Image (cartoon, rainbow, N blue to C red):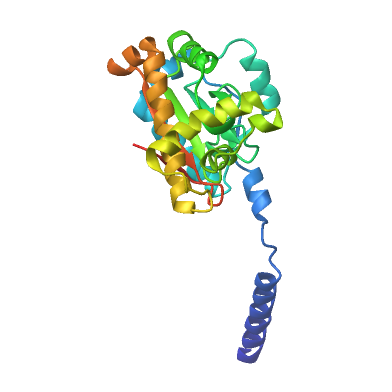
Amino acid sequence: MKSNVILVTCMLSVVFLSSCKNEKKIPVQEIQATKVVIKSVLTAEEQGSMSPDEIISRLKKGNENFINNNLTQRDHSEQRRIAAIGQYPKAIVLSCVDSRVPVEDIFDLGIGDIFVARVAGNIENRDIVGSMEFATAVAGSKVVIVLGHTSCGAVKHAIDNTDAASLGLSSLQGLLDEIRSVVELEGDAASSSKDKDFTNKIIDKNVQKTISDIRERSPKMSELETNGKLKIVGAVYNMESGKVEFLM
C-alpha cells in the first residue's frame, strides 16, 4: 500500500513539472492588448480644472510612456467622432518640421489633446504667434512649449552659415538668418556644426530666443503668464533616447 502511494505521488509530480515546462508564456503584445482603450477626448471641464504645472507634469509622464514603449491605446475612430463636436486642448507645441519628431507620440497624446505648430528651426513668426494667441486666449490652452530637438538641420545650417539665397531659396535664407543671430551671439566665424556640444548649446539658446520673442510679440500671452494662467516653456527632444528635457 505504501509503495502504491509513493508511485502515485511521483506520477503527479511528473505531470505537474511537465505542465509547468510546457506552460505558454503570454506575449507582450497580448498583455498590452488587455489595456484599457481610451475613447474619450479632453473636455472643457477637464481643461479648465488643470493648472499649467499639472499639464507639464502630465506631459512629462506621457514622455516616460513613449520612452518605455508603453503608449496609451486609443480608439481613434471614436475620438475623432467626439472631437468633431469641439476641442479643448491643454497645450500648444511649437516644433520643428523634422519628420523624426512625432509630437503627439513623444508626449503620449491623442486627438484633441494639444495644438501643434511646425516650422523649421522652431522659430516664431507673426502667424505662429497669432495661432498661439488663438490656442491660449481663445481656446483655453494653458501651456506653450517651444520644442527644439537634437541634430536639428536648420540649426546646423545656420551654424555653418549656409548660403541658401545663392540656391534661389530666399525664404529659407530668411529663416536661417533668424537662427544665425543666435549663433553670432554665442560663437564666432569659425563655429562648426561638427562641434556637437556647441550645436546643442545653440539648439537650447534658439529655443530660449523663440520664447523671448513670443513674449515680446504677444502682450496678451505675457499678461496671461504674469497672472499665472499660462506658462511658456522650452524643451528639447533627444532623437536618440526619446527623452524630452524641459528647460526650466
Res. 118 visible in picture: no
The residue at 66%/44% (across/down) is 33
Residue 63 point in image, percent of width and height: 50, 41
Viewer-proximal residue among 39 and 229: 229
The residue at 67%/32% (across/down) is 166
Q: Quadrant of residue 140?
A: top left
Q: Quadrant of the N terminus?
A: bottom right
Viewer-proximal residue among 149 and 170: 170
Judge left or right: residue 77 versus residue 149.
Answer: right
Residue 161 point in image, percent of width and height: 55, 39
Residue 175 point in image, percent of width and height: 56, 27
Q: Is 62 drawn above or below residue 12 in the view shown?
A: above
Q: Quadrant of the C terminus?
A: top left
The residue at 51%/18% (across/down) is 125
Viewer-proximal residue among 225 and 79: 225
Residue 157 point in image, percent of width and height: 57, 40
Q: Is 117 drawn above or below residue 73 in the view shown?
A: above
Q: Quadrant of residue 55?
A: top left
The residue at 55%/36% (across/down) is 108
